[in-house]
Image (cartoon, rainbow, N blue to C red):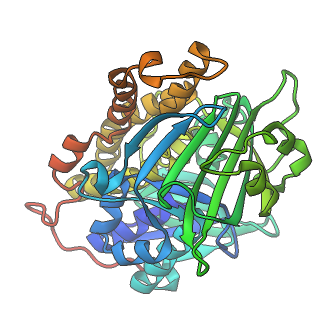
Amino acid sequence: MTVLIAGAGIAGLTLGLSLQRAGIPFRLFEAVEELRPLGVGINLQPHAVRELFELGLEDDLDALGLRTREVVYFNSFGQEVWREPRGRAAGYHWPQYSVHRGKLQMLLLRRLIAEAGEGAVRRGVAVRGWHERGDGITITLEDRRSGRSAGMAEGTLLIGADGINSTIRARLYPAEGAAQWGGTIMWRGITRGARFLSGRSVAMAGTKAQKFVCYPIADLPDGGSLINWIADLAMPAGHDWRPQNWNRPGLRADFAHRFSGWHFDWLDIPAVIAGAEGIWEFPMVDRDPLPRWSFGRVTLMGDAAHAMYPIGSNGASQAIVDARVLTRELLLHGATSEALAAYEDARREAVNALVLANRGDGPDRILDIVAERAPQGFDDIEALMPHAERAALAAQYKQTAGMDVAALNARLPLVPAEIPGRRSRERAP
């Protein structure tokens, strides 16, 4: 049996590495000819970090990013609304990390090639179609540069891990159309600046309509931080977001003036924006939850299955969990449609609920509630919104995202070290 994977993003690479460790043959196809460390910062939550640690990546993650200590919410006047510990400081057995997304992808790629060989990842080709036969599946490939046929490949299953604009998903749902825009534009950047708060803090200020998020992703030799930041603005009805692409340079003039007065004692936000080494512009988009991921010998995972707003730091984390659950089901059921159905049963409804929660602003909803109650600021946050109410909002999101501390610490590994009756399998070609 050979599992065919479309897409060498975080989802596809984590799956490939997990299958390699499990002795399940696979081949991975990536449309981009030369993978580079693109993107900006992301957060990896403890439920995903647990899976990467079980793949032996703890030292690599420590070299790559920072262990997050806390998340802190502020209103538009810089007043603290809510603070909670994160990772091991919150009682998890695993940390939370703030890392550069592209560097994480390159780490996974390096480890996969080191273990499975260069032939495990074929680059510059996209999966454009497939045909199921009785005992397997044949995929057709297209050369990304020329658009010409790049031949075929045969396997037992096809996994669509090809992102928010997945061609696999488009084949399964041809009437769906483009991703959905929620009305917000994000400008993202990286700035070298002074450490703020604990030096390991994720900070969020404002409301859904106007928000600034920032966190360090590396320490600097001068004692400062490499700060990853995101500025969100809700745009007026009729704003044309579609011509924008995922690598479009952003212009300070389009948004910086909206944050010009945000000089807070914990961070000078205008200075952070002014000092950015580069700025990129993205529309905040997602896709509607699907009623079904798996069709015969084909299934979806990661953003191809459940693209969500980047709220609550769960996109990459959920993709990693997908990969591990799918690996478990392949070990239990073999490379069969039953394995895909079991994987979907374990994941789809839970992640669909998270997509909808993020549309409602996820854990950041606390900022909107505070702004509604005290649009000009407050004298006493406890009188405005008691601690128990704030804690309940945070706990509710953790439950939805699979981040409940006690439950995560108590559950068994997603991929058991030994599965009764498991037969040894050949390594991937």
Q: Quadrant of residue 105?
A: bottom right
Q: Residue furthest front?
A: 379
| Residue at the image point whose x is 54% and y is 22% from the top | 379
Q: Which of 72 and 210 lies nearest the eye of the viewer?
A: 72
Asked whether, in this view, residue 137 is left or right of residue 245, the answer is left
Q: Position of residue 281 (x, y in %)?
A: 79, 49
Label total for image: 0
Q: Position of residue 213 (x, y in %)?
A: 62, 45
Q: Is residue 350 above or below residue 67?
A: above
Q: Is residue 28 visible?
A: yes
Q: Residue furthest right?
A: 253
Q: Which of 209 and 20 lies nearest the eye of the viewer?
A: 209
Asked whether, in this view, residue 194 is left or right of residue 70, the answer is right
Asked whether, in this view, residue 257 is left or right of residue 363, the answer is right
Q: Which of 46 and 354 lies nearest the eye of the viewer?
A: 46
Q: Position of residue 373 (x, y in %)?
A: 57, 13
Q: Position of residue 190 (x, y in %)?
A: 70, 62
| Residue at the image point whose x is 43% and y is 64% from the top | 14
| Residue at the image point whose x is 37% and y is 50% from the top | 86
Asked whether, in this view, residue 47 is left or right of residue 200, the answer is left
Q: Quadrant of residue 20?
A: bottom left
